[in-house]
Amino acid sequence: MQPLPQLIQNSLPYFVPEDATEDSVHTTLLADNIPDALATQLVLFIPLAFGRAFLQKFPLEFPPTFTLQYSNGEVVKDLLFADEPVYLAAARVAEDIIGKGAWSETFHFEVAAWSPEVDAFSQALVEGFNPETISLSALHIFGDIGPRPAQAD
């Protein structure tokens, strides 16, 4: 299998079509022979990482943890983004794109726009909140995201 950074780069176009959905991106990744759990993590963590990279220009603090609620109702709190190889690799890819001045509003922002944090921040701005007064809450993710890759490559 390809290293995570390359896999992330190759997955970015799947998020951009206007009719793309989480299910369609997941299905496309499965068709690329990506294991189910990894495809789920790519759909989840790529937009979050790209969203956070985009939002870095604002005075925000990002919650370091998230809560995972499995379909059987089990809840695991305080999972660290720093322990998620797919998130870390996606964050490095996004930061590298920004660092190289290659960020495209018509491509990379389309990926970032999938992030619930970007959505919440944008909604707060529309409602008239000052960016300096906005704070983000820890995410609550529903579903099983499966075993994580051993390393981020």
Image (cartoon, rainbow, N blue to C red):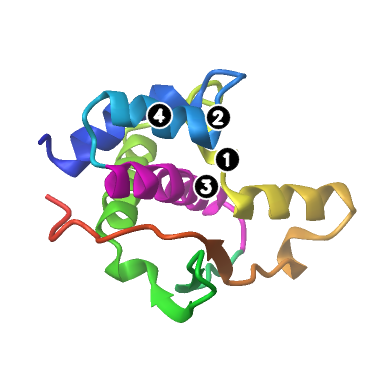
Mark 4 touching mark 3, by CB under 8 A?
no
Front residue of 37 and 57: 37
Query: What's the amino acid at mark 2?
Result: Glu
Label 3 or label 1, whichever comes before in sequence order: 3
- Above or below, 23 against 58 in this view is above
Q: Residue at x 84, y 59 (%)?
A: 129
Left or right, 47 with reference to 29: right
Q: CA distance from mark 1 to mark 2?
A: 7 Å
Whichever of callouts 4 and 3 sits on the residue coming sooner in the sequence is 4
Separation of marks 3 and 2 at Cα, in angstroms: 9 Å
Question: Between marks 1 and 4, how big is the CA–CA gap?
Answer: 17 Å
Q: Give the residues drawn in magenta, as a range.
A: 36-59
- Label 4's element? helix
Earlier in the chain: of badge 4 and badge 2, it is 4
- Which mark is on residue 114? 1
Q: Is residue 102 visible?
A: no
Task: Quote the CA–CA distance across marks 3 and 1.
Answer: 8 Å
Q: Secondary structure at mark 1?
A: loop
Please, what is the three-letter code of the amino acid marked with disc 4? Answer: Thr
Residue sitting nearer the eye, 152 or 74? 74
From the image, tell me which residue sits under label 2: 110
Residue that carries the numbered disc 4 in the rendered image? 27
Lower sequence index among marks 3 and 2: 3
Residue with the mark numbered 3: 51
